[in-house]
Image (spheres, rainbow, N blue to C red):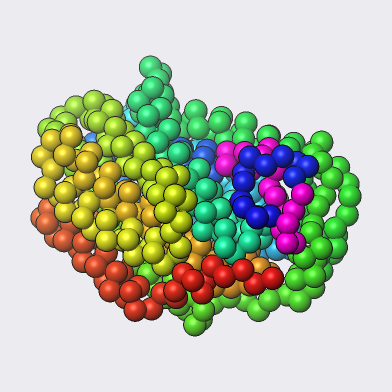
Amino acid sequence: MADFDPASSDTAPPAAGQRAIPRGRMALLFTVMLTTAAGNTAMQSVMPSIGTSLGVDDVWISLAYSWSALLWVICAPIWAQRSDRRGRKAMMALGMLGFIASFLLCGIMLWMGLVGILPAFWALLLFAAARSLYGGFGSAAPPAVQAYVASRTPRSERTQALSLVASSFGLGTVIGPALAPLMVLPFFGLAGPFLIFALIGLVTLIALRLRLPDDVPRFPARGSAYDAPYSGSPTAEVSKEEQEESQNAPAKLRWFEPRLRPWVVSGLIGGHAQAMILGIAGFLVLDRLGLRGDPAAGAGPVGLVLMAGAIATLLAQWGLIPRLKLGPRAASLWGIAIAALGTVVLGLGQNLHTIALGYSIASLGFGLFRPGNTSGTSLAVSRAEQGQAGGVTASVAGASFIYAPALGVWLYNYSDWLGFGLIVALCLVVFAYGSRALQADSTLTLDRR
C-alpha cells in the first residue's frame, strides 16, 4: 500500500506487495493495547493512595512491581518467538488472559488488606505475586501486536504505523486515570478499578477471539496456512511473503548485536528515566498538595496529572510524528531532549498546575522517544524477524521497570533533586549517545522492494 491507513476497507487492494490492515482488525489491535494501558495507569493512579492507607512505605509500593517487570523481561522474547510459530492472535489472547487474572487477583488481595482481613504485609506480598501473572503472561500481547502491524507495513511508513499502535497505549493512559476515581466503589473502595478492568479485559478477549482472523501456520515455523474456523472468526490467513520468509527461520536476535545495539542501549537508558518519573509522580502530588493525611482524596489529583501527561503523549503520537514525518532517530533525539526539560519543570512544581505542566512536557518527550525507539528497532531487522524484534522491544521496556521506579522513589524521598537530577542526567546521556550512534532516518526508512 502507498500509505498506511488504519481506516482502510477490507476490500482495499494492497500495493507493492503490502496488505492494508482492515479497519475492523486495526480496531481490535487498538483495543487490546488500550485496555492494558488503561488498566495499568488506573492502577498507578490509585496505588500511592492504597499504600498510604495500608501504612506501607512508598519504596515498597514501587518494589511490588519489580518481580513482574523481571518476568516481563524474561518472558516477552519467549512469547515473541512463539508468535512466529503459533500466530500473533494466540499470543494476544494469552496476554489478555494474563491481564484478566492478574487484575482480578490484585483487586481481591488489596481489598482484603484495606478492610483488615489481611495484614498490610501479606496484602502487598500477595499483590506482588498476583501482579507477576501480568509480567509472565501479559507480556505475550504487546510484541504480538507490534509484529502483526510491522509485518504488514512498508518500511517508509512503519514509524507512523507503530506510532499509531503506541498511541492506543497513550489513549489508554488518558482513559485510565480519568476513570479510576469513578471506579472507587462503595464496597470495594480503592480496589474497585482492578476488578472493573478485569471485566473490561474479559470483554476485549471475547472480541479478539471472535473477530480477529486466525493466523496459526499449519506447520510451525514452515509458514503454510490453512482455512478453518476458529471461535467463529474469519478464515486463517498468512501472506505469501510471510510463508516464504518463515521457511528460512531467522537466527535468534540478541539484545546487543550490532544492528540492535544503539536502539537497545538508548531504549534501556531512556526507559529507566521514564520509569523513574512515573514512579515519583504520584507520590509527588500527595506530598506537594498535602494529601498524605487523606489518601482517598489523592486519587483524583494524581489521576489528573497522569491524564494530562497522557494527553501530551497522544499529541506527540497522533499529531507531531505523522505531521512532521519524524523518523526514528529524529523522534528519539527530540523526544529525549524535551523529556529532560519537562523533568526540570516537574521538579520545580509546587502546585497542581505546575506539576501537571511539567509532567505533560516530560510525557510529550517520552511520547516521541518511545515510538521512535520502537520503530528504529523494527527497521533495524528484516521482516521475518519482526516477532523477535517485538520481543526485544517489550523486554527492554520491562527491564526499565525492574528497579528504576523504586530507585527513583527512594532518591526522591531522600532528596527531591537527587531523583530529578538522575532522570535529567539519563536523558542527556541518551541524547549524547544517540546523536553519535543511531542510524540516519534516510537510511532506515528506505523501502527495500
- Residue 405 spot, x, y in % from top left: 30, 55
Viewer can see residue 11: yes
- Residue 72 spot, x, y in % from top left: 49, 58
Q: Relative to the observer, which residue lies in front, 112 or 385?
A: 385
Instruction: Reply above or below: 69 against 190.
Output: below
Q: Quadrant of the N terminus?
A: bottom right
Kindly indicate the quadrant of the structure image that contains residue 211: top right
Position of residue 236 in the picture relative to residue 249 (left or right): right
Instruction: Reply above or below: 99 against 374.
Output: above
Residue range (magenta): 13-31
Number of callouts in the render?
0
Q: Residue furthest right?
A: 227
Q: Relative to the observer, which residue lies in front, 20 or 386?
A: 20
- Residue 395 spot, x, y in % from top left: 49, 63
Q: Residue furthest bottom?
A: 258
Q: Quadrant of the C terminus?
A: bottom right
Q: Residue furthest top?
A: 186
Q: Relative to the observer, which residue lies in front, 63 or 203?
A: 203
Kindly indicate the quadrant of the structure image that contains residue 388: bottom right
The residue under the point 21% across, 66% down is 425
The residue under the point 16% across, 53% down is 344
Q: Relative to the observer, which residue lies in front, 437 or 396?
A: 437
Judge whether residue 426 is colored magenta: no
The residue under the point 82% across, 49% down is 236
The residue under the point 79% across, 59% down is 239
- Residue 19 spot, x, y in % from top left: 72, 54
Judge whether residue 14 is colored magenta: yes
Viewer can see residue 71: no
